[in-house]
Amino acid sequence: MIQAKDLTVRIGERTILNHIDLVIQPEKWTCLVGPNGAGKTTFLRALLGVLPYSGSLTEGGVEVFHSQERNVAFVPQQPQIPLGMSVTEYVMMGRAKKDGWGRESIAGRRFVHKVLEQTQLYGLHNQHVSRLSGGEMQRALIARALAQEPEVILLDEPTSALDLHHQISTLNNIELLKERGVTIISTMHDITLAAMYAEEIVVMQDGNVLLHGPAHSVIHSSELREAFDNRINVFTLDSGRPVIVAAKENLI
Amino acid sequence: MKNQLNEDHLGRIWNWRITMVAGLILLSVALLGVSFGPIGLSFPKIIKTLLGGSNGLQGQERVLLLQLRLPRVILAALVGAALSTSGAVYQTVFRNPLADPYLLGAASGAGLGATLAITSSGGNVYGLLPIFSFVGGILAVLTTFFISGKFFAEPNSLLLSGIAVGSFGTAVQTYLQQRHSSALRPVYSWILGELTVANWQVVKWSSLYIISSILILITVSKQLDGLMLSDEESFSLGINPNKLRIIAVAAATLATATAVAASGLIGFVGIVVPHLVRGITHRVTNRSLATIAMAGAAFLVLADLGARTLLSPAELPIGVITAFVGAPFFLVVLRKRRVTQ
């Protein structure tokens, strides 16, 4: 279980997270939504353990700051793409936590091979990551996270800059982790997709948590509209699936 | 047909056979290095002498091998290994393929130290010069870090500080040279790099620093790959990026400062050799550091051989050879990489 108690993160003079209390259940997909500047990415970075904070942020009762005992995978929105590195080398780095840096166990290589097939990267495995398209790079990032066999995976806008087809295939790849009992925490701008995949949704605004609960109840809540200054509309399809779109005055 | 699950399809990230080949090339080149020169020495006799067997080289030839050529070849190998390994590490740490070992001001600091030694010493230049240039190089890098203030938080600010410190050091050095025009020639010859001062004493102290620095870098080499990612990504893979950068830069700077102190400023090795090894092996991993060290050693032994023999009995500065051979070679490798990509 991940627990934030009175969690505050300041960067310089600015307060990015403001006395947050939050409990995130293990082995579920929790999605953080909210407008830009709400503090979603900062929460992910704090949870990764790279940001100093006041209050408490624990995973399994252990403070997460600078804690590297845990196996937490991180998929950034804007990765640093290493020049000259092949897809295989890139994905193989995911084995570092399990096998040790630079140790290529046969089991590890077999696992990476399977992951490359799962993420449809096998044909590209000798290509340099710097030559991949946006969608392929996103798959390589997910593949590295899958190879890591993490207990927790943190994803910062995993579907941004992807077309609809690649959004779905990326999210399906992430969903594979749920079957393995991995706790998934992501930020996502597309709330419709968040409602489709996540079980829990956390609504954030200005460094505060406005609401946290099961996806279906949060989607229809007034807090979600409030977070976006009432500029969203929530429709329900015949199938019962919610669709959230930006509200525009005089929209026909 | 569906691909069979066979991990060998992926190809190994690093194959140690490549390292062994580099080792064999280094040994062969070293043998050439001690054999060729104004006076040729035969391979079998060299080997017999080195192994302590009977029927080895005698008299002047023995002195030539053991007191002149062997320390010189070993020093060239050490300096080549130091510069190429440091270059590769700097390129990883600063995520900049054009980074070289002199990036943080080590060259101009060492140059200033050498100029001070040459202008202030009465006659015992070679006693003071290595110490002054070593201290100058280390001080310049520390100043760069101090001025940057943010250390590795902003690599670009660190690089700009390195440029500022470098320019300042060069300015002071030029001023000193103008004031002591008699120092111009020795300083200039030192700047172009020279291994003529090689003797067992220089080999002894430089090998201590260079070998220990390279061993440290090889020990952390596997983790260095993680520094090619963002800090968050490398942290999630179990690395403490700042700690690793400090270890890597400290060891690379120590190796560079020692190399500069022992042999002057030899350019291009730190950029050409890492790119050459990566271009040939198609691997960017830092697990190639041992291979890069051996390739750098072989490259400089060959360059020194050229410097000694091309205009024999006169000598060319080794820096001229490395630049003359290195620059076109570098362009070929870059072109080849572009084609294969």
Image (tube, helix red, strand yellow):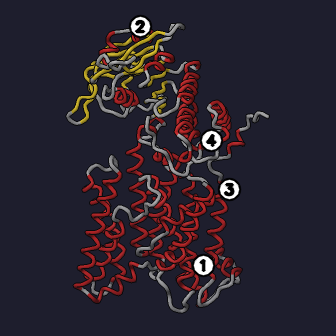
In the picture as drawn, the residue positioned furthest to the left comes out as A13
Chain letter of the residue beneath label 2 in the structure image = A
* Residue A19 spot, x, y in % from top left: 25, 20
Q: Nearer the viewer, mark 1 or mark 2?
A: 2
Looking at the image, the residue that sits furthest to the bottom is B313
- The kind of residue on which mark 4 rests is Glu
| x and y percentages locating residue B321 in the rendered image | 51, 79
Front one among B138 and B49: B138
Q: Is residue B39 above or below residue A174?
A: below
Say whether residue B11 is left or right of residue A35.
Answer: right
Give the distance between the C-alpha atoms of the residues marked 1 and 4, in whole angstroms.
38 Å
- Mark 3 Cα shell of 10 Å, populated few (<14), some (14-19), many (≥20): few
Q: Indicate the quadrant containing the C terminus of chain A: top left, top right, bottom left or bottom right.
A: top left
Q: Amino acid at mark 1?
A: Gly
Give the alpha-carbon distance from disc 1 to disc 2, as whole Å: 78 Å
User: Mark 1 and mark 4, same subunit?
Assistant: no
Q: CA distance from mark 3 to mark 2?
A: 60 Å
Q: Is residue B310 above or below residue B162?
A: below
- Sequence-first disc among 3 and 1: 3
Q: Earlier in the sequence, mark 2 or mark 4?
A: 4
Circle 3: residue type: Arg
Instruction: Look at mark 3 in the image and give the residue it sits on.
Output: B17
According to the image, label 2 marks what residue?
Answer: A217
> As shown in the figure, which amino acid type bears the numbered disc 2?
Ser
Element type where label 4 sits in the image: loop
Label drawn at residue B33: 1
Q: Chain of mark 3?
A: B
